[in-house]
């Protein structure tokens, strides 16, 4: 079984008002990734993603590709400690 990983991600570009958080939520649920996606006041979106290494990598790849409306210019990714008690994916 793969290890769990967790990372904090800051997405910049055209990521607010274009369905970015909902897209991330739907893909995360599909892949079994937990965490959250929150809009930030500077126009970026902060995410924390937790799951199997391959699932988190797949989600990051889907986020980079986008949904046709959003345009991700950069993803800053930082590995952080796993939260074993976390269930589900939230968005504000």
Image (spheres, grey):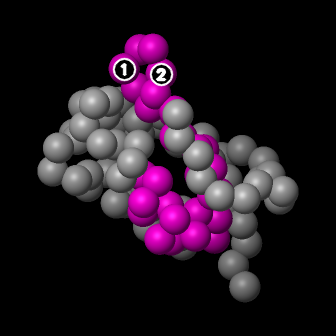
Residue under the image location 36 percent in, 52 percent down:
23
Q: Secondary structure at mark 2?
A: loop
In this rendering, position of residue 44 left or right of residue 37: left
Residue 5 magenta-drawn?
no
| Mark 2 and mark 1 residues within 8 Å of each other at the beta carbon | yes
> Which label sits on residue 11?
none
> Which label sits on residue 40?
2
10 shown above or below 1: above
14 shown above or below 41: below
Magenta segment boundaries in residue numbering: 24-53
In this rendering, position of residue 81 left or right of residue 77: right
Query: Between residues 13 and 16, which one lies in front from this camera angle?
Result: 16
Q: Is residue 9 visible?
A: no
In this rendering, position of residue 18 left or right of residue 58: left
Could you tell me residue 16's position as x and y percent?
Answer: 32, 30
Q: Which image quadrant is residue 36 in? A: top right
Residue 41 magenta-drawn?
yes
Q: Secondary structure at mark 1?
A: loop
Q: Quadrant of the N terminus?
A: bottom right
C-alpha distance separating marks 2 and 1: 6 Å
> Which label sits on residue 43?
1
Q: Is residue 41 visible?
A: yes
Could you tell me residue 63's position as x and y percent?
Answer: 35, 52
Residue under the image location 67 percent in, 53 percent down:
6
Q: Neighbour class for label 1 at 10 Å: few (<14), some, many (≥20)?
A: some
Query: Between residues 52 and 33, which one lies in front from this camera angle?
Result: 33
Residue under the image location 25 percent in, 37 percent down:
18
In this rendering, position of residue 81 left or right of residue 89: right
**Furthest residue in direction right, as rendered:** 85
**Furthest residue in direction left, as rendered:** 68
Residue under the image location 72 percent in, 44 percent down:
80
């Amino acid at each position: 079984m793969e290890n769990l990983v967790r990372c904090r991600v800051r997405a910049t570009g055209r990521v607010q008002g274009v369905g970015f958080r909902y897209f991330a939520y739907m893909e995360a649920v599909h892949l079994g990734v937990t965490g959250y996606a929150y809009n930030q006041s500077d126009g970026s979106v902060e995410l924390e993603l937790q799951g199997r290494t391959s699932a988190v990598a797949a989600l990051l790849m889907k986020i980079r590709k986008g949904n046709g409306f959003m345009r991700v210019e950069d993803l800053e990714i930082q590995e952080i400690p796993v939260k074993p008690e976390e269930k589900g994916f939230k968005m504000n």
